[in-house]
Image (tube, helix red, strand yellow):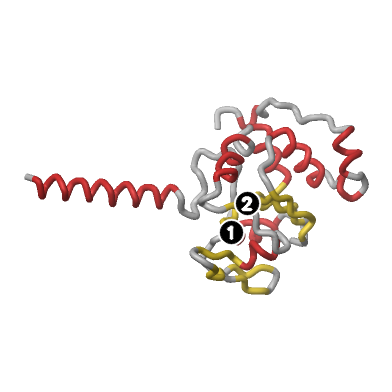
Amino acid sequence: MRKIGITLSLGFLVFGLFAFALSNSEKMRPDSLVNWLSWEDAMEKSKIEKRKIFVDVYTMWCGWCKRMDSATFQQPYIANYLNEHYYPVKFDAEYKKDIVFKGKTYQFVKSGKKGYHQLAAEITRGRLSFPTIVFLDEKWNILQPIPGFKNANTFEQIITYFGEDQYKKTPWATYQKNYKPLPKVIPASNAGN
């Protein structure tokens, strides 16, 4: 009887670990309001319609990354803006597979107990802190990496600053001082999703 109990306990433990690994895999959250894309999907979509690219560089172990997922990216007006104006990419800085980006192959580099992906280092300009949000233009050139957690109000200003090309003509301090917030309502086309 005791062996059955131990076997069942081990079975539940293995199942729990397996379920945890699946929930933390490279797949995007099914309940996310943001239509997250992989690098490959964003590059394919960009061939059809040019848009800026927004990259959320995160790690599985980063608490502030998880907080940004739930507190910032789950705001309907934020998700709607990202989905309409950008190709949003969620990128694990410890991703293990190679990625070909702008003709160059980037790989995972083992470092210490974990490691990092070379592309994460490239687009954050070598500053691997998490979360970091990165803005790329329509030709996939880096506009700006911005490290650290951003609440919805601050994040809204940043995504509209780049999304509406204000960065080309207005200094950030001026833009921030004169900023008019986005409407906080869900468009009818997204209601019920």
Identified at 77% across, 42% down, the residue is: 158
Three-letter code, disc 2: Phe
Q: Quadrant of residue 76?
A: top right
Q: Quadrant of residue 45?
A: bottom right
> Is 15 located above or below residue 122 in the figure?
above
Q: Residue furthest front?
A: 112
Contact, CB < 8 Å: mark 2 with mark 1? Answer: yes
Residue at the bottom extreme?
A: 104
Please state the horizontal and vertical placement of residue 178, each as a whole percent of the image: 89, 32
Image quadrant holding the N terminus, namely: top left
Out of 147 and 54, give the one closest to the viewer.
147
**Residue that protrudes farthest toward the left in the picture:** 1
110 on left or right of 101: left
Q: Looking at the image, which residue is at 69% across and 57% down?
A: 46
Is 19 placed left or right of 114 in the picture? Answer: left
Please tell me how crowded label 2 is: few (under 14), some (14-19), or many (20+) other residues with Cα within 10 Å.
Answer: many
Dot 1 alpha-carbon crowd within 10 angstroms: few under 14, some 14 to 19, many 20 or more: many
Q: Does residue 6 appear left or right of residue 164 in this picture?
A: left
Q: Earlier in the sequence, mark 2 or mark 1?
A: 1
**Which quadrant: the C terminus?**
top right
Question: According to the image, label 1 marks what residue?
Answer: 93
Residue 103 seen: yes
Nearer to the camera, 10 or 52: 10
Amino acid on which the number 1 mark rests in the picture: Ala
On the image, the x and y values in percent for residue 133 come to: 69, 50
